[in-house]
Image: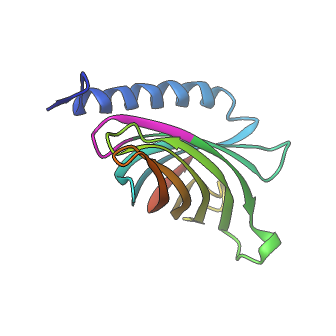
Amino acid sequence: MITNAISYSQAIGLAAIITIASSASIAIHAAEHDLRIVPQVLAGTAGLEPGVAMEWRSLDIGHLVIRPEIFLSEDHRVGGGGSVLYEFQNEIGLPAGQTLSVGPRLVGHNSDDTGWEFDAFASYAVSLGYVDRPWRHAVGALGALGVRDDRRHDEVNLGASIGAFYSFRF
């Protein structure tokens, strides 16, 4: 099925190319930064959206997380956006190996029904161990709540999503 001159397989191919290119660029800086690739799936008012994010944490800045993402919208078109998060761990008394990151998120869904979305975004992560490389592997939950562009009715409505992810640290 072809939608707006791009098929589902082409969209997946494009997403893979962007992810690989981003990963290669990011891997070069892995020695100085905490970099993670994050396959994810979100479901909510904009539909089911599988995708991938990159998380970059500067060891110099501290708790700041830069999180660009790409995904397939409900119409099988490539959408994307990003968020800037603040990562909490000790500040709110979470056990070792758990973090909560919160901040603003702006995405473009690129579907017939949904355009842009601006949310308050949260990510809760649990490290899967590894004493010698903490946070090498992690799993977690995602949540977003905000406003979204409803193209079908030419109005702005509630935008909400929940999801899950796996994270690999370079």
Quadrant location of the N terminus in the rendered image: top left
Along the line of sight, the residue nearer the viewer: 162 or 46: 46
Displayed quadrant of residue 123: bottom right
- Name the spot of residue 148 as percent of width and height, x first: 49, 51
Q: What residue do we see at 31% from left, 33% from top?
A: 12
- Name the spot of residue 77 as percent of width and height, x first: 32, 35
Q: What residue span does the magenta drawing correspond to?
A: 72-81
Q: What residue do we see at 60% from left, 58% from top?
A: 121
The furthest residue to the right: 60
The furthest residue to the front: 154
Q: In the figure, is residue 22 to the left or right of 96?
A: left
Asked if 142 appears above or below 70 in the picture, the reply is below
Q: Is residue 170 visible?
A: no
**Magenta segment: does it hold 78?**
yes
How is the rendered protein coloured?
rainbow
Asked if 119 appears above or below 170 in the picture, the reply is below
Along the line of sight, the residue nearer the viewer: 75 or 148: 148
Q: What residue do we see at 39% from left, 59% from top?
A: 45
Along the line of sight, the residue nearer the viewer: 129 or 89: 89
Asked if 63 appears above or below 56 in the picture, the reply is below
- Name the spot of residue 158 as percent of width and height, x first: 49, 61
**Magenta segment: does it hold 73?**
yes
Displayed quadrant of residue 35: top right
Quadrant location of the C terminus in the rendered image: top right
- Name the spot of residue 161 as percent of width and height, x first: 46, 61
